[in-house]
Image (spheres, coloured by chain):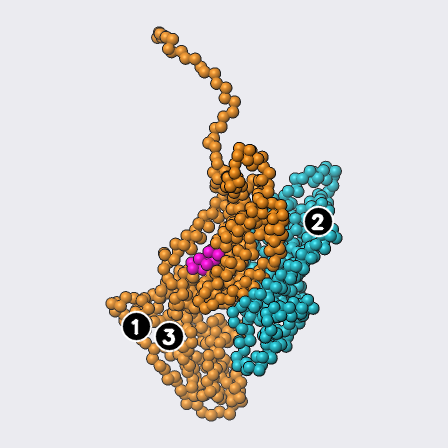
Chain colours: A orange, B cyan
Amino acid sequence: MTEFSLTAEDFERVSVERRVQTIVRPSLSYWQDAWVRLAANRRALASLYIVIALLLFTVAGPWVWTVDPTAQDLDQLSTPPGADRRAQIVEPYAPWNGVFATVTESLADTVGATAEIQLVQPASTQAVRLVWAPVLGASGYRVYRNVYDPAPDGAVGLPLAEIYDPRQVSYEDLLDLTPTRYWYSVIATDQSGREAEEYTTLAVDTIRVITAAEAQTRGLVDLETPLSLGDEVRVSFHPLGTDYLGRDMLARLMYGARVSLFIGIIAPFFFVLTGILYGSAAGFIGGRVDQVLMRFADFVVALPFLLFMILFKIAFGIGPGESGVVPMLVALVVLSWPATARLVRGQILQIREEAYIGASQLLGAKTHYLILRHMIPNTVGVVLVTLTFAVPTVIFVEAFLSFIGMGVAPPTPSWGSMCNEGIQTMLNHPHELILPAVLISLTVLAFNLLGDGLRDALDARMRSRE
Amino acid sequence: MYAYTLKRLIQGVITVWFIATATFVAMHSVPGDPLLNERGVNEEIRRNLEERYGFDRPIFDQYLIYMANMAKGDFGISFTQQNRSVNDIIREHFPVSATLGVLAIVFAGLGGVLWGALTALYRNRLPDVIVMFLVILGISVPSFVIAALSQLALVGLNDLVGFSVLPVAGWGSILHMLIPSLVLGLGTMAFLTRLMRSSMLEIVNADFIRTAYSKGLPPTRVFIKHQLRNAILPVITVLGPAIAAITTGGFVVELVFAIPGLGRFFVQAVQQLDYTVIMGTTVFYGAFLVFMVIAVDLIYGLVDPRVRLE
C-alpha cells in the first residue's frame, strides 16, 4: 500500500442545491414548435417538397427549358412523349401524275373488290402513293384512310378521295401525314355511285422524311453539314410531346403553371388579406358596426360563387390579346373574402376576452400595440392554414372556368384550358389531357396535405384526429 | 322557429333580387352589342328587335321592365334559338339536371356516410387506408378529368365485352344516368367521407357509446342507433354547399357526357353570349341555390333538437 498525505485542500464541501424542476430541453418558440411538428409529419413534409418543386418548375423552368410555348412544330403534331425523332433526308416533293389503266367497258351489274393495292414508292410523311389493279365494271373509286385496322367493324375511316374516272387507278395521299401506320381502303363504285360490298385494305407504315433544305431552315442541322439523300437527322426534341398544334407540351405546362399557380397563390393572398382587415375591424370595433359588417359578409357568402365568377368574366369582357387573368383575380377576391373575415373576426373576439389582453392593457399597452403584438400573431396560424386550403380551391375554380371556356383566353395556356383542349383529342392522344390533369391533381393534393399538416402543427384546437 | 324561417326567407328574396340586379348590370356592361352580331340586319329589323327587347328605352326603364317580367316569372326569349323562350328551356332541361343532381346527391350522401363509417370502424387498417387514399384522389382530381377518364374506361369496357354495357354519352335510360351521376357525386362523396370519418371517430369513444355497450346492446344496434345517427349530423350541415357544388359541377359533367341538361345550356349560352338565357338561367340557378341552402339549414334545425334556430 502506498501512503497518501491528505491536506485540507483535498476536501471540498459538496454544495447542497435543490433543483426540483429544470428545463432540460431548449425552449422552443411557437414557430420552432410548429416546424418540429410539421417535420415529423411525413406526408406534410413530402407535400411541402412537392410544392417547392412545383414552384421551381414554374419559376425556373422557363429558363432551363427555353422553348417558346407558342412556337408550332409542324413536323410533330400531337406527338406523344418519347416518340421516334428520326427523319430521313429525301428529295424535294415532285408532283406525280398518277397511273391510268386502259379499261374495257363492261356491263357487269355488281362491282367486285379491288385487287391488291400497292405502294409506288416507300410511304413517307411527304406522300403516300397507291396503285391498284382496275376493277371490272367500276365507274370510279373511293379511297379511305384510317388509323386503326378497319377489318373487324368495317370502319374504313376518313374519306380521302372520290375518283370518277375508272381509268385512274392511283391515288396520292398528302393529307396531314404523320409517322404511324395507316390503313388505306380502296372501294370501287358502280355507275350510280354505290360502293362495292367488298374492298381491299392495305396497311402502310409511313416514315418521317424531310428535305435537306427544310432540315437546314428549321435548324435541325447546321448549315455547313453536307446532307445526302438517305441521311438521318433528328427532328426537334419535345420531352413531353406536343399538342394538337405542335406546341411543346413541357413549355406550355411551365407557362400554364405560371397562370394557374399565379392565380392560385395571388388570389388567396389578396382575399385572405381583405378578410383579415375586414374581420379584424369588425371584431375589434364590435357593436353596431360589427353587426352591419357581418350582415354584409353573410350576404356575399349567400351569393352562388361560380355563377358570379362567370358573370364577372362576361361583364369584364376580354379584348384581343388579353389573357383574362386580371378579371379572374378581381372576381375571386371580391367573392371569396367573407370566409376569412368570419374566421378572423371569431378569433379576434375570442382573443379580446383573453386574460393576457387585459393584463397588457393594465400595463398601459396602446391599441396598435395590442393588435400588432397580440392579435395578429395569435391569428396568423389560423390564417396560414386558411391560405393553404384556399390555394387548391382557387386552382380548381380556375381549371373549371378555363374548362368551360370562361377562364384564361387562348393562346395563353393554363392547366385548365390545356385540359379543355386535351379532352377533344383524348381518344387518340391521351397525353394532351393526362399531363395537365396530373399537374392539377398533384398541386391540389400537395396543398391539401400541406394544409392538413399545417393545421395540425399550428392550431392545437383544430388538430385532426388520426 | 317561424320567425327564423320568415327572416331567412326574406333574406333569400333579397339575395335573389341582388343576383337579378347584378346579372342585369353585368349583361349591360358587356362591351359590344348583341344585335350587331346578326350579319346583314337591316335597319328596320334592328329597330323591331330593339323595340321588342326594349333596348331603345333608358337603362333604368329596361331594368324595371326586366324586373317586372321576372317577378311574373317571365325570363324572355332566347337570342340564339329561334322562337324559344327561356322559360321553355328551363322547363325542358331543368328536370334532366335535377334528376342527375338528385342521383348524384344520393350517391354522394349514401357513399359518404357508409365509407366514412367504414373507415372509422377500420381505423388505420387496410380498408381505411385504401378508402382514404381514394378519398384524397377524389378530392384532388378535377371532375372533368374524372368524367373524361371514366368515358375512356367505358369505351374500353364496351370494347372488351363486345357490346355496349353502359352508354358512353347521351341521355334517356337509367343506364345513361348511372355513370354521370356517379362522377358528379364523386367529389362530394370524398368530402363527405372525410367529414363522416372524423365525426365518427369523435363518437366512437364517447361515454354514451360505452354505456350502450355495457347495457348489453348488440353492436349493430349501437352502430346504427347511436353511432351513425349522431355522426351523421355534421354531414347534414354541409349538404347545402354540397348541393351548390353538385349543381355547378353539373355544368361540366353535362358538357362532357353530352347530357341535355340546363347546365349545358347555361354554358353554351355563356359562350354564345345569349343574353336572355344567361340572365334567366343565372337568376333561376341563383334562386334555386339560395333557397336550397335555407331549406338545408331549416332541416338541420328539425333533425338536431340541440340546434336552436334564431
Image quadrant of residue B202? top right
* Amino acid on which the number 3 mark rests in the picture: Gln
* Amino acid on which the number 1 mark rests in the picture: Ala
| Nearest the eye: B188 or B146 | B188
- Is B20 placed left or right of A44 in the picture? right
| Nearest the eye: B178 or A28 | A28
Residue beneath disc 2 = B309
Tell me the chain of label 1: A
Q: Is residue B244 above or below residue A376?
A: below
Q: Is residue A261 magenta?
A: yes
The x and y percentages for residue B34 are 55, 73
Q: Is residue B249 above or below residue A100?
A: above
Q: Residues within 10 Å of mark 1 (few under 14, many from 20)?
A: some
Q: Residue at x 51, y 50 (%)?
A: A273
- Is B154 placed left or right of B69 in the picture? left
Residue beneath disc 3 = A126
Tell me the chain of label 2: B
Q: Main secondary structure of the magenta part?
A: helix
User: Magenta segment, which residues?
Assistant: A253-264
| Marks 2 and 3 on same chain | no
